[in-house]
């Protein structure tokens, strides 16, 4: 069974190989307080920034946040195995991240899952990951052939929390721009035609209660160009996967365009197969 995938209305990369039971939508979610001060009292912005930096300045906690960029909930046991630490050590790190407001817990039966507390946290970690990584980190053979192959798959196409990234994500963004479905010359926004096109595919573009924008650019850390994020990006990703235009590679974040996807994306957006990075 697979880990729980978040709703697209909730809002950049690291593959994993673990499995966990699905988390039903009725799971109880408990977010950490906005700060470490008693009663959630306001803190000085500089102090809060220092608190956040301290939370992410430890290797295991940083690895947890990178793993959660796949957009799915993880159990403490999965994270402990993924990071190579004892379950008790992982429990301590998870508590600090929840108490610090970066993660939220979801309980279902005997299982406790964690995910990012809100889309803004995912965006923060995504931006930091993009700053820390670069194309060389994906294409280097230093980690061996298996790591190199996984890196190439991530560069071709992946989920970036809940939207599409890599060459696939950039190709979709470029094609939407070329067809006047998306404007990048005067900001970054869907056009009326773009809203109609996505809605026609079955997208729900109603804005969530959070401050998440309908569309925003997300700098792709392998392509070094923007791909579509925001509510529209999440819905496009959901539809591409639901329609089997692309499928996940294993249980990680990498995705691969299917033969059906090649035909449909060419028909819908004029994207040629050469732009979809189908090489093995």
Image (spheres, rainbow, N blue to C red):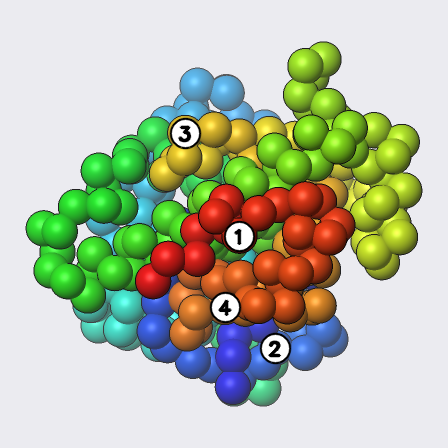
Relative side of 102 to 134, left or right: right
Q: Find out whether the residues at labels 1 and 2 contact each other: C-beta distance under 8 Å.
A: no
For marks 1 and 2 on the same chain, the one whose residue lies earlier in the sequence:
2
Disc 4, disc 1: CB below 8 Å? no
Q: Using the rendered view, name the quadrant where residue 191 is placed.
A: top right
Q: Residue 16 at x, y = what percent?
A: 35, 67
Residue that label 1 marks:
273
Measuring 78% from the left and 28% from the top, which residue is drawn there?
A: 180
Q: Distance between the residues labelled 3 and 4?
A: 23 Å
Q: Which of marks 3 and 1 is nearer the N terminus?
A: 3
Q: Mark 4 points at which residue?
A: 248
Label 3 residue SS: loop
Q: Position of residue 152 (x, y in %)?
A: 31, 53
Vertical relation: 158 (above or below) 57: below
**Separation of disc 1 and disc 2 at Cα?**
36 Å
- Nearer the observer: mark 3 or 1; the answer is 1
Mark 4 and mark 1: Cα distance apart in space: 18 Å
Q: Is mark 4 on a helix, strand or loop?
A: strand
Task: Measure how far apart labels 3 and 2 are at the Cα level.
Answer: 34 Å
- Whichever of labels 3 and 4 marks the residue nearer the N terminus, that label is 3
- Where is residue 76? Give x, y as percent: 39, 71
Residue placed under numbered mark 2 in the picture: 23
Which secondary structure lies at badge 1? helix
* Residue visible at 37% across and 48% down in the picture: 155
Q: Residues within 10 Å of mark 1 (few under 14, many from 20)?
A: some
Which residue does the numbered mark 3 point to in the structure image?
224
Horizontal relation, residue 66 to residue 244: left or right: left
Query: Depth-wise, is mark 2 or mark 4 nearer the camera?
Result: 4
């Amino acid at each position: 069974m697979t880990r729980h995938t978040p709703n697209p209305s909730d809002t950049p990369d690291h593959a994993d190989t673990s499995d966990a039971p699905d988390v039903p939508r009725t799971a109880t979610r408990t977010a950490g307080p906005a700060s470490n001060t008693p009663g959630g009292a306001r803190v000085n912005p500089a102090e809060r920034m220092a608190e956040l930096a301290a939370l992410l300045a430890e290797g295991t906690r940083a690895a947890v946040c990178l793993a959660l960029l796949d957009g799915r909930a993880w159990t403490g046991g999965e994270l402990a195995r993924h990071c190579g630490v004892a379950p008790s050590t992982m429990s301590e790190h998870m508590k600090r991240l929840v108490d610090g407001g970066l993660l939220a817990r979801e309980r279902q039966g005997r299982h406790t899952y964690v995910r990012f507390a809100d889309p803004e946290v995912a965006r923060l970690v995504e931006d930091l990951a993009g700053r820390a990584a670069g194309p060389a980190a994906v294409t280097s053979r230093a980690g061996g052939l298996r790591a190199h192959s996984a890196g190439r798959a991530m560069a071709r196409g992946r989920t970036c929390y809940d939207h599409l990234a890599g060459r696939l994500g950039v190709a979709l963004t470029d094609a939407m721009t070329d067809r006047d479905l998306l404007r990048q010359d005067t900001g970054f926004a869907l056009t009326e035609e773009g809203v109609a096109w996505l809605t026609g595919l079955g997208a729900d573009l109603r804005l969530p209660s959070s401050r998440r924008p309908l569309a925003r650019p997300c700098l792709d850390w392998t392509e070094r160009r923007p791909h579509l994020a925001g509510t529209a990006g999440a819905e496009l990703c959901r539809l591409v996967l639901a329609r089997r235009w692309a499928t996940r590679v294993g249980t990680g974040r990498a995705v691969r365009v299917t033969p059906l996807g090649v035909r449909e994306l060419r028909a819908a957006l004029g994207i040629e197969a050469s732009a979809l990075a189908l090489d093995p």
